[in-house]
Image (cartoon, grey):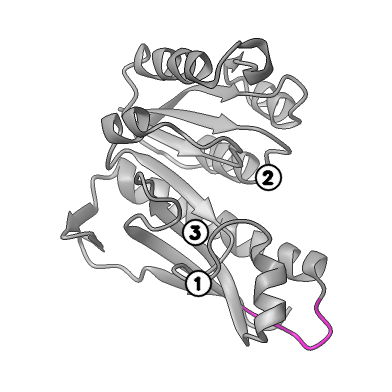
């Protein structure tokens, strides 16, 4: 049984889709704990609704960033964690944390990487006039938003789109690809060779939503 810890900071939209899949599918995995760095994160209530243990490690309670980083690392490592899932976790993890969990630290980014790294990706997409946008599940490395890509989801950009409408469309595909990527990890289907992820047995690593 794979042991999973999920880190959150906010509303818990991807957390909700992951916990729903975990409750409905016969995953050979246990979600040991949801950890939030914010005591007011709505995702905390979502986790409790599924009966998942919750721990709050409030970054504002620490005198230094390093102290928070060490506390978070100790909490995750003490559980014997096989996979750390970032589900809207809005803190940059320190190099030692990322290195220790290399190949076991998964994130989702709301763009088709390597395009539009950083923040406000939907605004960037609209400003550039791209016709397709989306989301990427990747392994985290010490360079932000450039880790090995596990899966991508594509959505159309419509002429009348706003950041909000595009965000909602991208969120739908996020829920699909994140659950799929975690399932591949649980089933030991992910292979990484020279920074390129493949799935064994072979399976499509791109998904799309047409229209909507």
13 or 149, which lies in front? 149
Q: Residue at x 47, y 47 (%)?
A: 107
Q: Earlier in the sequence, mark 2 or mark 1?
A: 2
Q: Which residues are magenta?
A: 155-161
Q: Mark 1 and mark 3: span between their CA atoms?
A: 18 Å
Q: Nearer the viewer, residue 36 or 4?
A: 36
**Residue nearest the viewer, comparing 140 with 45:** 140
Residue beneath the point at 64% across and 40% down: 16
Q: Which residue is mark 2?
A: 13
Residues under numbered marks 3 and 2 in contact, where contact means CB atoms less than 8 Å apart: no
Side of 27 where 1 appears, left or right: left
Q: Is residue 55 magenta?
A: no
User: 114 above or below 190?
Assistant: below
Quarter of the picture containing the C terminus is: bottom right
The residue under label 1 is 115
Does the magenta stretch mainly form a helix, a strand or a loop?
loop
Task: Using the numbered discs, state the Cα–Cα distance from disc 3 to disc 2 in whole angstroms.
Answer: 13 Å
Q: Tag 2, which secondary structure? A: helix
Q: Dot 2 surroundings within 10 Å: few (below 14), some, or many (20 or more)?
A: some
Q: CA distance from mark 2 to mark 1?
A: 23 Å
Disc nearer the start of the sequence (1/3): 1
Q: Is residue 26 left or right of residue 187?
A: right
Q: Residue at x 30, y 33 (%)?
A: 101
Residue that numbered label 3 is attached to: 177
Residue shown at 61% from the left, 46% from the top:
14
Q: Position of residue 167 (x, y in %)?
A: 72, 64
Q: Position of residue 64 (x, y in %)?
A: 56, 16
Residue lying farthest front? 64
Foreground label between 2 and 1: 1
């Amino acid at each position: 049984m794979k042991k999973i810890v999920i880190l959150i900071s906010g509303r818990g939209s991807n957390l909700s889709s992951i916990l729903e899949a975990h409750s409905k599918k016969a995953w050979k995995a246990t979600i040991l704990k949801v950890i939030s760095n914010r005591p007011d994160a709505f995702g905390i209530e979502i986790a409790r609704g599924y009966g998942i243990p919750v721990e709050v490690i409030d970054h504002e309670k620490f005198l230094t960033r390093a102290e928070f980083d060490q506390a978070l690392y100790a909490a995750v490592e003490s559980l014997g964690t096989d996979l750390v899932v970032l589900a809207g976790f809005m803190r940059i993890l320190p190099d030692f944390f990322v290195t220790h969990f290399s190949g076991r630290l998964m994130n989702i980014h709301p763009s088709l990487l390597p395009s539009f790294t950083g923040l406000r990706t939907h605004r960037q997409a609209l400003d550039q006039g791209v016709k397709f946008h989306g989301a990427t599940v990747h392994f985290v490395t010490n360079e932000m938003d450039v880790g090995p890509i596990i899966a991508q989801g594509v959505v159309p950009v419509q002429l009348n789109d706003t950041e909000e409408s595009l965000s909602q469309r991208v969120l739908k595909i996020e829920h699909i690809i994140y659950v799929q990527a975690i399932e591949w990890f649980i089933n030991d289907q992910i292979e990484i060779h020279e920074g390129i992820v493949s799935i064994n047995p072979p399976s499509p690593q791109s998904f799309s939503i047409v229209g909507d």
